[in-house]
Every structure is written in structure tokens, then in C-alpha cells.
């Protein structure tokens, strides 16, 4: 439990603070938001663990400490305000006034930005999932009849973003072009640029191996990549949270504390070598991300309940966990037979 002691303490402090300053109902709402964020973010934790494993303990600590400020204040409070500023063409002080004193109008403006948010987040996560599926260097395959053919045509760095750009362009044009198309293409380019910079710096500094540790600018970019990834996962959560409460402070607090718990889970998986022990968890997380990306792009046209996306994602990760357990037991059985 030492891995989660700080996160547990923050949950207790946050719920107590909500109860003292805003009442018992606010405390219960905060607890519900924390639980939702934790339950629906296992795929985020698994993907984060893959990157975090290549960062030093100092950067891993920064992921929890500095990352706490980024998750709570930045991604769950400041970033939505910036989105409303850009999409509604309003000055920051006016948006801040709405967020703190007129949450209904703020929620309306944020909902108006749903198309741009879903297009960016969906395209960013779609590109991430496609890079994994087309990676011809992966040795472990879970759904081999799907992954093997994709590996055969993989190996080209530009293929995943090209496919993502085609899909996003079709979606954007179907919506009439404009912000959906622009935001979607920005999402594809953003992922490709960040991932490309990390790989380039890794090659320059000799850190391009699969388990080599990032240092210097490579580590900084990897750290920033984790923050943008967190933002992409949090978009639908921030919008959906308004169905539970219109109090922006509670949304930032509940989702932010939940996100910090997920970060603690990420560090735990890195320290325990969970992804090495349960070899298909990473596969399940990427399929869950693919599901989320598709749901975000579909939500541009029709409403997709967060519960459906979350339950499907958890189901896929659960199936990958069961497959990992079976594979681990088979390895142990073969090892014991070899010894005997």
C-alpha cells in the first residue's frame, strides 16, 4: 500500500475538504467522480506504464508530484477554460467568471466545443492505437489472426498516421469540414510529431532500444507526451462530469484526484514489472484505446454514453488479463516440466 499512500491521503483530504466547505452532498459527488475516473482509466495507466518504465526514478516522481498539479489544475480546470476561450472566442477572464459563478453557461460553451474536442482526442488516440497494431517489432501477439496481418504491412512510420488522417478526413468531411476536420488533423499531426521527436532524440542519444532509459530532452518530451495523453483521455470525462454536477471546482477536484490515483497505479505497475508478467495487458489497453477513439469520433454525430465506452474498455482489459494469466501459467508449467 506504500505505492498508494499519498493517493489515499489525497482522496481523504479532498472528500473532507468538500464536505467542510461545500457540504456532505459535495463530498459524495467528489467521491463518485474519483471512482469514475479510476474505473475508466485503467487503459491510460497501462499505456503510461510502458513509457514511464523508460524514465528515471526522478522523472517518475515528477510524474506524481508535478503531474498532480497538471492533472488537477491544468487538464481538469485550465485546459477546458482554454478550449472555451478558443472555440467561443471569449476572453479568459470572462470564461473564468462563467466557470466559477455561472457553471451552466460554462458547461454550454464547453458542450459547444464537443466536436473539436472529440475530433482531436479521437484522432490522437486512434493514431496511438494504430502505431501499436502496425508495429512489426512486437513479438507477443494476443489476437494473432488480427495482429499478424497488420504486422506484415507495418514497419513504415508514416503508415499509421496516414490511415488515421484518411479516417479523420472522412469523418470531418461527413460533418461538413470546418472544426472537426481541422481538430482531427491536428490530433494526428500532434501525436506523430511528439512520438517522432521522442524517437529521434532517442536515436541521437543512443536511447532508441526498446528498454533504454530516456534522458535529457528525450525524457522531457516523454514526460510531456504523458501529459498530452492524459488530456486526450480526460476530454470525455470532463464533458460527462457535467451530467453529475455543474460545479467546476468539484469536477476538477474529483477527476484530478482520480487521475492522480491512476498515476500511482502506473508507477506501481512499473515498479512491479506488471507488463512483463501479464504480457497481454498492453494489447488489451490499446484495443480499449481504439474503442475510445472510435467512440469519440462517432460522438461527433451521435451521443455515445460514457458508461458504454468505459464498460467495453474494462471488458477488453479484463479479457487480456485473463489471457495473460493463462499464458503465465503455461510458461510456469513448461518450466516445471523442463526442470523435472
Image: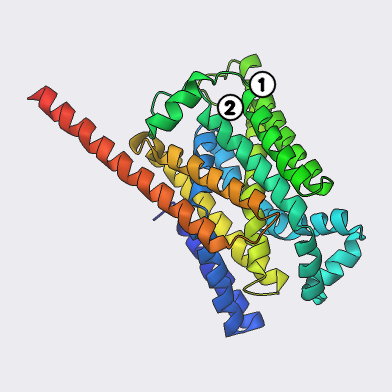
Residue 202 lies in what quarter of the image?
Answer: top right
As rendered, which of 150 and 1 lies closer to the eye? Answer: 150
The residue depicted at 80 percent of the width and 55 percent of the height is 83
- Visual colour scheme: rainbow
The dot on residue 201 is 1
The image shows residue 4 at horizontal and vertical percentages of 45, 55
Query: Image height check: is 141 above or below 36?
Result: above
Which of pointers 2 and 1 lies earlier in the amino acid sequence?
1
Q: Quadrant of residue 228?
A: top right
Q: Are marks 2 and 1 in contact (CB under 8 Å)?
A: yes
Q: Position of residue 34 (x, y in %)?
A: 54, 65
* Residue 79 visible somewhere in the drawing: yes
Q: Which SS class for mark 1?
A: helix
Report the residue at 77% width, 51% height from top: 116
Q: Pick the quarter of the image with the N terminus.
A: bottom left
Q: Is disc 1 surrounded by few (<14), some (14 to 19) or many (20+) residues within 10 Å?
A: some
Q: Nearer the viewer, residue 80 or 129?
A: 129
**Marks 2/1: CA distance?**
9 Å
The residue positioned farthest toward the front in the image shown = 174
Which residue in the protein does label 2 denote?
214
In the picture, residue 144 is in which quadrant? top left
Q: Nearer the viewer, mark 2 or mark 1?
A: 1
- Residue at 52% x, 53% y is 41
Q: Is residue 189 above or below residue 83?
A: above
- Mark 2, Cα crowd under 10 Å, few <14 / some 14-19 / many 20+, is many
Res. 6 visible in picture: no
186 horizontally vs 306: left or right: right
Q: Is residue 265 left or right of residue 162?
A: left
Q: Residue at x 42, y 48 (%)?
A: 316
Measured from the top left, where is residue 43 in percent x and y?
50, 47
Amino acid at each position: 500500500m506504500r505505492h498508494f499512500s499519498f493517493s489515499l491521503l489525497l482522496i481523504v483530504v479532498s472528500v473532507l475538504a468538500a464536505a467542510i466547505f461545500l457540504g456532505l452532498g459535495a463530498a459524495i459527488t467528489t467521491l463518485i467522480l474519483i471512482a469514475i475516473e479510476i474505473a475508466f482509466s485503467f487503459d491510460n495507466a497501462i499505456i503510461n506504464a510502458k513509457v514511464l518504465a523508460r524514465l528515471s526514478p526522478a522523472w517518475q516522481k515528477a510524474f506524481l508530484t508535478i503531474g498532480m498539479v497538471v492533472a488537477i489544475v491544468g487538464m481538469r480546470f485550465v485546459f477546458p477554460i482554454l478550449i472555451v476561450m478558443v472555440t467561443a472566442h471569449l476572453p479568459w477572464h470572462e470564461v473564468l467568471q462563467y466557470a466559477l459563478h455561472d457553471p451552466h453557461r460554462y458547461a454550454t460553451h464547453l458542450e459547444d466545443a464537443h466536436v473539436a474536442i472529440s475530433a482531436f482526442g479521437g484522432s490522437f488516440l486512434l493514431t496511438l492505437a494504430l502505431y501499436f497494431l502496425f508495429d512489426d517489432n512486437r513479438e507477443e501477439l494476443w489476437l494473432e489472426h488480427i495482429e499478424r496481418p497488420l504486422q506484415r504491412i507495418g514497419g513504415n512510420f508514416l503508415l499509421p498516421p496516414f490511415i488515421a488522417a484518411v479516417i479523420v478526413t472522412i469523418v470531418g468531411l461527413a460533418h461538413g469540414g470546418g472544426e472537426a476536420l481541422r481538430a482531427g488533423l491536428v490530433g494526428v499531426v500532434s501525436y506523430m510529431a511528439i512520438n517522432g521527436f521522442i524517437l529521434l532524440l532517442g536515436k541521437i542519444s543512443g536511447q532508441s532500444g526498446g528498454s533504454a532509459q530516456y534522458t535529457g530532452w528525450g525524457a522531457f518530451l516523454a514526460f510531456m507526451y504523458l501529459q498530452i495523453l492524459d488530456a486526450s483521455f480526460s476530454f470525455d470525462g470532463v464533458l460527462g462530469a457535467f451530467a453529475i454536477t455543474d460545479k467546476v471546482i468539484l469536477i476538477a477536484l474529483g477527476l484530478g484526484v482520480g487521475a492522480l490515483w491512476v498515476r500511482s497505479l502506473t508507477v506501481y505497475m512499473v515498479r512491479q514489472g506488471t507488463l512483463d508478467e501479464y504480457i497481454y495487458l498492453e494489447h488489451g489497453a490499446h484495443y480499449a484505446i481504439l474503442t475510445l477513439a472510435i467512440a469519440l469520433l462517432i460522438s461527433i454525430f451521435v451521443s455515445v454514453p460514457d458508461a458504454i465506452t468505459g464498460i467495453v474498455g474494462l471488458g477488453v482489459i479484463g479479457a487480456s488479463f485473463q489471457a495473460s494469466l493463462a499464458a503465465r501459467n503455461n510458461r510456469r508449467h513448461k518450466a516445471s516440466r523442463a526442470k523435472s
